[in-house]
Amino acid sequence: MGANDVSMIKAAHIGVGISGQEGMQAMLNSDFAFSQFCYLQRLLLVHGRWSYNRMCKFLSYFFYKNFVFTLVHFWYAFFNGFSAQAVYDTWFITCYNLIYTSLPVLGLSLFEQDVNETWSLHFPELYIPGQHNLYFNKKEFVKCLIHGIYSSFVLFFVPMGTIYNSERSDGKDISDIQTFCLIVQTSLIWMVTVQIALKTTYWTMISHFFIWGSLGFYFCILFFLYSDGLCLMFPSIFQFLGVARNTMNQSQIWLSLILSVILCVIPAFGYQFLQPLVWPVNVDKVFDRINHCKTRPPQVRVRTKLKHPSLRRSAYAFSHKQGFGALITSGKTTKTKPNKKNSFPVKK
Amino acid sequence: MAMNYNAKDEVDGGPPGAPGGTTKTRRPDNTAFKQQRLPAWQPFLTAGTVLPTFFIIGLIFIPIGIGIFVTSNNIREIEIDYTGIEPSSPCNKCLSPVSTPCICTINFTLEKSFEGNVFMYYGLSNFYQNHRRYVKSRDDSQLNGDRSALLNPSKECEPYRRNEDKPIAPCGAIANSMFNDTLELFLVANESDPTLTLIPLKRKGIAWWTDKNVKFRNPPGTESLKERFKDTTNPVNWLKPVYELDPEDEDNNGFINEDFIVWMRTAALPTFRKLYRLIERKNDLHPTLPAGRYYLNITYNYPVHSFDGRKRMILSTVSWMGGKNPFLGIAYITIGSISFLLGVVLLVINHKYRNSNNTADITI
């Protein structure tokens, strides 16, 4: 496109430049640039849609995990004299967003696909949620918040009920604050891991590695931070000596962990199943159809005939300059594959 | 200016380069990674996966809950509150003691005998060991035996850091508020014969192994413990210095005194219990604590009534899941039942909506 289109590209939310015969200016000022007009279809229906999907999943998950992480302190305030005592080891607070939960979120936002590119191009209706802002809006944010509040409630009260006036299996103390911190931390990591496993619909090897690897990495770092060597070198900084060893062999800890994870996940799981069934939006019907096609053996799809097949061979093209005749008549700018809809709705 | 379109240049996808030169293609590689075609597992939530999950959760959780609940019910436990708030309580006189130390005795009866190892705990209520300023108020370097920290405790211990110009060992509010009641247990032989048998209480083996052997260490040296602690003073509320906590046993004296270690492991909630003594099981077939009447002798040193605190003594046996705690058992049974119920409800909803969806759906 020409140099006079630069202002149009700059003014748009997303400016797309087609590189061609009129110099580089339009291309350099655009957000996306490619060589052929037909690539616009892929840009919108495949990459744009995936990008919107990934962003929304990333945002809602990120808010959720931080709500759970922080709101536990609200519940604990009632039991520690409102003194702002943390429920976690200070090193856990440092490493939570930086190390333990960063890679799974990165994997989700890089590799997530709800349907692959072939289906995306075949069903342009899947693009509608992006236009109507369906996947992350105020209502979704509030849902995220409520889920976070509920999860933090479970995350605090299940370990509290477990250790309240309880002991280890050899009679020694289990209701100290360091053990409580460890239980809450570990339950939290498991909880957010299972939650992201539920959200991920496209499991590549990299996703497996990031998600389960982060979980394993948490346990490795846990035993390292609570080991004798490190704690004896810096006793005032690493204060949790021996807590992991003394607590992880208690069966009631694991039982409480399983209980809190299941309790947190059941509502999300049930809602994810129930929502397309009872309150379906149009996209859900499309997904249903796609999965129906995937599970049935592939057969030749019967296409509905267009009303005026005679129009398929006609096309008009206008050019403002001499010299483009060869391009137009070569047929490369028209695709022969008919779409169900002749054009997709234009974004307002 | 527009040039004539040349079909050759389309291969590049970019502006045509200098004639005669080879232009590098900017097309990304056609690998699975870069074209986002990595092999992947794409699960989809269908009724066939969700509904069995709910039923399985219910079927697994309910038996586990019943098992835990039954185990917890079989644990024997008795709690004796000896704060002495009520005027009828034998320890009421110790609230404002005429003479120190104040000794009071409480009678209680064990309905059933206690088998196996029995553990004696002291419990406190309304005692906020989890207050943030309290939890910070310790010096772990000093407690690990570091000589420089012994004579120059950390600033976190303020205001319990120095007293009369000498460093306090052990410093901090946690150490200062150490529990110092003494409890003794006597068995009354039977109604007619009032002889009292002292129950042997073991005072070692109550702290975590890692605490006792790694985290807490006395200051190094070959001289006596008293010498190693010279130039320090005991905490403000302590009656005796740290090197006299157990003069008979070197291994239980100073910082490695097990009662001290147990106290320093701060509790997470305002109502807590800490292990005080062990009553080991007898080798013969007699129960550790037979059913009958018992006397609890208390040397009442620790004042709690000023902040509405309560003190109690607890005798308890343990099992594979710890002490008597019905919470986990009840929670598992409840969640298992709810999950099963939800499975049934979802099955009904699924049946109803799936049928209506099928009739309305038009396949292309």
Image (tube, coloured by chain):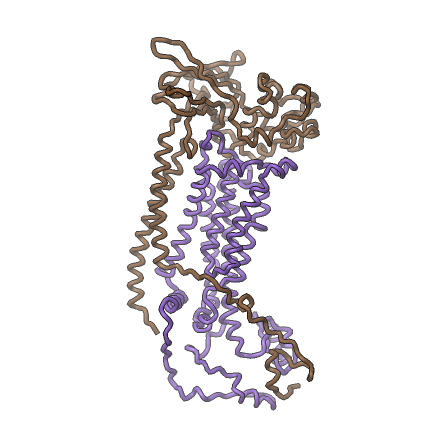
Location of residue B276 in the rendering, given as x and y in whole percent from the top left corner? 49, 24
For the C terminus of chain B, which image quadrant? bottom left
Q: Colour of chain A?
A: purple
Q: Residue at x 59, y 86 (%)?
A: B7
Q: Is residue A76 or residue B27 the one in the foreground? A: B27
Q: Is residue B246 above or below residue B75?
A: above
Vertical relation: B261 (above or below) B340: above
Letter of the brown chain: B
Q: Is residue A300 left or right of residue A139?
A: left
**Count of numbered badges drawn on the protein:** 0
Q: Which x, y percent locates residue A259? A: 42, 44
Q: On the picture, is A252 further left or further right than A51? A: left
Say which quadrant the N terminus of chain B sits in.
bottom right
Q: Position of residue B228 (x, y in %)?
A: 68, 22
Residue plotted at (64% across, 21% down): B234
Q: Is residue A309 above or below residue B166?
A: below
Q: Is residue A296 visible?
A: yes
Residue A276 percent coordinates (x, y):
38, 61
Regarding residue B90, the answer to whether it shows in the image is: no
The structure residue drawn at horizontal position 59% and vertical position 46%, both measured from the top left corner, is A94
